[in-house]
Image: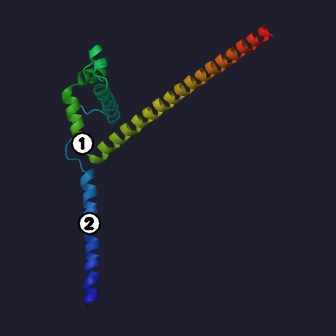
Amino acid sequence: MPNVLHLIDKVMVKNCCFLTLVLLFFACAEKVIEPPEDLISKEKMTNILYDLALLNSAKSTNKAVLQKYSVEVMPYLYEKYEIDSVQFTKSDLYYASIPLEYEAIYTEIESRLEKEVDKMDEERKQKTEAAREKSKKLRDSLKSNASNIVKDSVLEEK
């Protein structure tokens, strides 16, 4: 009899876990907030947040460049994408209320940023390789010239 109760217990636990997962899945997909009238499209929002990430990175790395050109991050983005702060805030809040959508936006941003980093790393490697090659040619040329000078001076002594 205890084995049957134990088996029933396991089945109930599995069913409860399954039900909880199903409820969580649908709860995450549920729209908590209605979309605002002037909702920024997902693609445009992705571009805005991508630019925001780049500008914030630039701001924390080399603030002087942004100051030199009088770039203030948010006003610049509002002007570039022809939006205002209220539209941005409402759209951001709406997408944040749909975790799967928001995650997709940030996954796209992360992917784009990684591609940029890879591209910059590749350019850096190419420049470094070109500089090494140029340096090697210069050293070889100097050695060759030095060798010729030594040979010429030895021949002149004879």
Amino acid at the residue labelled 1: Ala
Please state the horizontal and vertical placement of residue 9, each as a whole percent of the image.
25, 79
> Which one is nearer the viewer's eye here, 106 or 16?
106
Q: Is residue 65 above or below residue 85?
A: above
| Quarter assignment of residue 113 | top left
Q: Left or right: where does residue 84 sit relative to residue 146?
A: left
Using a 10 Å C-alpha cutoff, classify the residue at mark 1 as few (fewer than 14 neighbours), some (14 to 19) or many (20 or more): some
Amino acid at the residue labelled 2: Leu
Decide if residue 35 is in sight here.
Answer: no
Q: Residue at x 71, y 12 (%)?
A: 149
Q: Quadrant of the N terminus?
A: bottom left
Q: Is residue 86 above or below residue 31?
A: above
Residue 19 is labelled as 2
> Which one is nearer the viewer's eye here, 9 or 132?
132
Q: Left or right: where does residue 145 sit relative to residue 43?
A: right
Q: CA distance from mark 2 to mark 1?
A: 25 Å
Q: Residue furthest right?
A: 158
Indicate the secondary structure of the residue bearing disc 2. Answer: helix
Q: Residue at x 43, y 32 (%)?
A: 116
Please state the horizontal and vertical placement of residue 104, each as a whole percent of the image.
34, 43
**Which mark is first along the chain, 1 or 2?**
2
Please state the horizontal and vertical placement of residue 51, each as a whole percent of the image.
33, 28
